[in-house]
Image: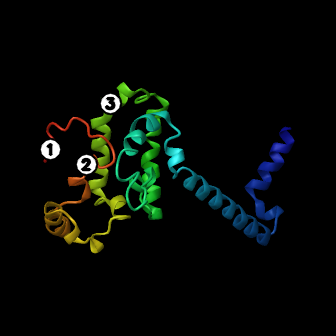
């Protein structure tokens, strides 16, 4: 067994002595394609609503709340899923968000929000993290579907048209500044500006 390990190590230490450069190049290219394909397959598999609500914490809390909103059922039949609002569509932004979300797995592992009571106790903190993230990226996920350039202010309420044509247009505010709780119940909003 030790001899086999030494032989494998010699091959790995100096592969060009044992294999041609062409073989190594083609082998590396094929391995790269397999790795890239596997990576993207895993990335897309974790970017589905089915994956998001596979945790009972999400299914029993925020997913149930989403089901009562216009983002779930509406007159046009266009439905937003968890990744539509919580994961950017652009690949580089998506990777950054996935790395950030990997930290959230600790909450699942350690049961931080595994009951309704624990979830409610952390709701404000969770909401504030999400609001800050959306504020920092200028509500990028909202803009994947809602494009300012195509807004018809004449079909909006006077208050909405005023806010969109001034504060949003100037960059003074972003979507999340006014639309907190658009798809989920709000936490206790004491001390939050505008509420």
Instruction: Tell me the residue that label 3 is attached to.
Output: 120
Please identify the quadrant where the N terminus is shown: top right
- Answer few, some or many: residues within 10 Å of disc 2's Cα (few below 14, many 20 plus, some between 14 and 19): some
Looking at the picture, how far across and down is residue 159, in whole percent? 13, 60
Instruction: Tell me the residue that label 2 is attached to.
Output: 180
Asked if marks 2 and 1 touch (Cβ < 8 Å), the reply is yes
Q: Nearer the viewer, residue 3 or 135?
A: 135
- Answer few, some or many: residues within 10 Å of disc 1's Cα (few below 14, many 20 plus, some between 14 and 19): few
Q: CA distance from mark 2 to mark 1?
A: 10 Å
Write the residue at 13% across / 65% down.
Answer: 162
Q: Is residue 103 above or below residue 166?
A: above
Instruction: Tell me the residue that label 1 is attached to.
Output: 195
Q: Earlier in the sequence, mark 2 or mark 3?
A: 3
Looking at the picture, how far across and down is residue 188, in whole percent? 21, 35
Place residue 125 in its image quadrant: top left
Q: CA distance from mark 2 to mark 3?
A: 17 Å
Looking at the picture, how far across and down is residue 99, in whole percent? 46, 50
Q: CA distance from mark 1 to mark 3?
A: 19 Å
């Amino acid at each position: 067994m030790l001899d086999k390990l030494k032989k494998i190590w010699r091959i790995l230490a100096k592969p060009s002595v044992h294999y041609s450069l062409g073989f190594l190049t083609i082998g590396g290219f094929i391995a790269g394609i397999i790795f890239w394909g596997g990576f993207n397959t895993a990335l897309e598999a974790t970017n589905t609503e089915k994956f998001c609500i596979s945790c009972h914490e999400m299914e029993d809390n925020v997913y149930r709340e989403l089901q009562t909103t216009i983002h779930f059922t509406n007159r046009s039949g266009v439905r937003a899923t968890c990744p539509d609002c919580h994961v950017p569509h652009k690949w580089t932004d998506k990777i950054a968000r996935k790395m950030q979300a990997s930290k959230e797995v600790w909450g699942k592992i350690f049961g931080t929000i595994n009951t309704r009571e624990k979830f409610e106790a952390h709701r404000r903190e969770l909401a504030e993290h999400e609001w800050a993230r959306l504020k920092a990226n200028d509500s990028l996920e909202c803009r994947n579907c809602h494009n300012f350039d195509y807004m018809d202010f004449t079909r909006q309420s006077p208050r909405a048209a005023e806010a969109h044509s001034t504060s949003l247009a100037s960059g003074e505010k972003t979507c999340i500044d006014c639309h907190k709780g658009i798809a989920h119940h709000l936490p206790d909003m004491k001390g939050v500006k505008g509420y």
